[in-house]
Image (tube, rainbow, N blue to C red):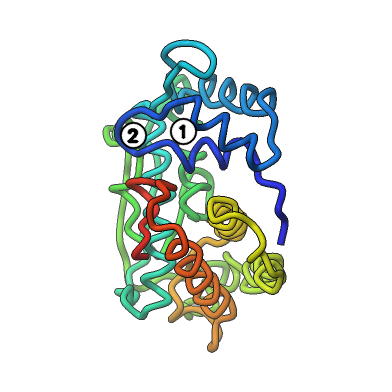
Amino acid sequence: MNTQISPRTIIEALLPFDGAANLGIIYDTANRLQVGDQPVRLALRRLISTGDITQHGRGRNGTIELTEAGRARLERERIGLRLAFAQDADQAPWDGYWHLLALSAPESERAVRDTFRREMHALGAVSISTGLYLTPHAIDAALTPELDPYLVTASVTALTVRGTDRNEDIAETLWPARDTVIAYEALEAALSVDISDQEPVARQLILAESLDAALRDDPLVPVELRPTPWPPTAVRRRWLDRWREATASAPDLHVYQGWLSRDA
């Protein structure tokens, strides 16, 4: 398992969903994990420039906190994480509906159109025609509220895409199973590496970063539309066992406070 933890992971792990984080603690934690101050400063600047966080004060005496945009981004990631574990626990059955989304914004509303495309991609929706996206999930609530006046949505149970109307074939055409399985091969290999010699906070961050990398390439298509057994389910269950072991060994650590539950 990769034991080189990114500065961004350290920052986000110690940044509560609500409230401020002390930069001294972030720098000290990074140093303990063999990450220097300069990479942390660069990661902070990037997060500030993208509008995810604000900083108050300078250096180790300063604090940072999430902006509304930053909280919205992390909330979208949390929705994906919850959905993945709910699918694994057979608690998120597919309701049989396909969801279609399009945008009625004029070409001059470039920022709105860019936000829509970016969020469609982030939420696993696929473009099936110019400006028209498809997903098996009801994702409207996860979208930036500013998109609401421009959204056109529909939900259907009968759908034909590229000549096929069988749901499993539609899923395979638009979200090939092999691509998702490959995304989990690195995580599966990583879970075979012994990290018990790492300190507790390092174990948690290594595990979190590894799962995040796999989830970025997983559209979380309902398992009813995937082959059985579905390999990513088994890998995530193994990951969850390791996560529980790591968090149980250090119950007082405040990692991913408020958005990555210890009871996932």
**Relative to 140, residue 24 above or below:** above
Q: Amino acid at mark 2?
A: Leu
Residue 175 appears in which quarter of the rendering?
bottom right
* Residue pictured at 35% horizontal, 36% vertical: 144
Q: Residues within 10 Å of mark 1 (few under 14, many from 20)?
A: some
What kind of element bears circle 1? helix
| Residue position for label 2 | 147
What kind of element bears circle 2? helix
Q: Amino acid at mark 1?
A: Thr
Q: Position of residue 177 (x, y in %)?
A: 62, 73
Q: Are marks 1 and 2 in contact (CB under 8 Å)?
A: yes
* Residue pictured at 37% horizontal, 60% vertical: 262
Instruction: Pick whichever, 110 or 69, lies toward us.
Output: 69
Residue 151 appears in which quarter of the rendering?
top left
Q: Is residue 95 left or right of residue 256?
A: left
* Residue pictured at 43% horizontal, 23% vertical: 64
Query: How many marks overall?
Result: 2
Q: Residues within 10 Å of mark 2 (few under 14, many from 20)?
A: some
Instruction: Pick whichever, 167 or 115, lies toward us.
Output: 115
Q: Residue furthest top?
A: 57
Spatial CA span between label 1 and label 2: 8 Å
| Residue position for label 1 | 115
**Relative to 135, residue 68 above or below:** above
Q: Earlier in the sequence, mark 1 or mark 2?
A: 1
Does residue 183 show up?
no
Q: Position of residue 18 (x, y in %)?
A: 30, 35
